[in-house]
């Protein structure tokens, strides 16, 4: 989404609307990318990873704190990230998991 928002002629609010997120959220990700906290892939490296979040019709039950965890499945491994996770550390972990695959 961030890379798409930087394409020539792209309008941030239109990109955000297409992915059903707020423009402010996308602007925050763009700021993180400019600050080096997000790495933008080159065009041929772009892939889509579906994100599943508990919603209104969700059957998720249990500890409310557990529902705030992000579950990332990559290369047969599962990584859980909680609120406030250090993004540099998480990036290093994900790169290591991908490299081990």
Image (spheres, rainbow, N blue to C red):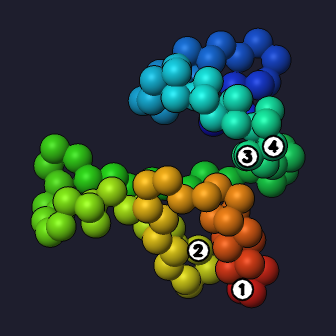
Which residue does the image show at 71% across and 86% down from the upper left?
A: 101
Residue shown at 71%/17% (left/top)? 10
The 10 Å Cα crowd at callout 3, few under 14, some 14 to 19, many 20 or more, is some
Question: CA gap, disc 3 to disc 2?
Answer: 18 Å
Between label 3 and label 2, give the one nearer the viewer: 3
Pointer 1 and pointer 4: residues touching (CB < 8 Å)?
Answer: no
| Residue labelled with disc 3 | 38
Q: Which mark is residue 36?
A: 4
Q: Are marks 2 and 1 in contact (CB under 8 Å)?
A: yes
Q: Secondary structure at mark 2?
A: strand
In terms of sequence position, does the residue under pointer 2 or pointer 4 come before the other? 4
- Where is residue 36 drawn, in percent x and y? 81, 43
Q: Is residue 36 above or below residue 62?
A: above
Q: Please give the residue where the numbered disc 2 appears in the rendered image.
A: 74
Q: Would you call the spot at circle 4 few (<14 residues within 10 Å), some (14-19), or many (20 or more)?
A: few
Q: State the SS at label 3.
A: loop
């Amino acid at each position: 989404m961030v890379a798409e928002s930087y394409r020539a002629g792209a309008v941030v609010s239109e990109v955000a609307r297409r992915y059903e997120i707020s423009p402010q959220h996308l602007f925050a990700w763009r700021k993180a990318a400019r600050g080096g906290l997000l790495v933008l892939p080159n065009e041929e490296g772009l892939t889509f990873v579906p994100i599943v979040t508990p919603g209104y019709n969700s059957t998720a039950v249990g500890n409310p704190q557990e529902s705030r965890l992000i579950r990332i499945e990559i290369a047969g491994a599962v990584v859980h990230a909680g609120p406030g996770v250090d993004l540099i550390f998480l990036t290093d972990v994900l790169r290591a998991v991908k490299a081990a695959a």
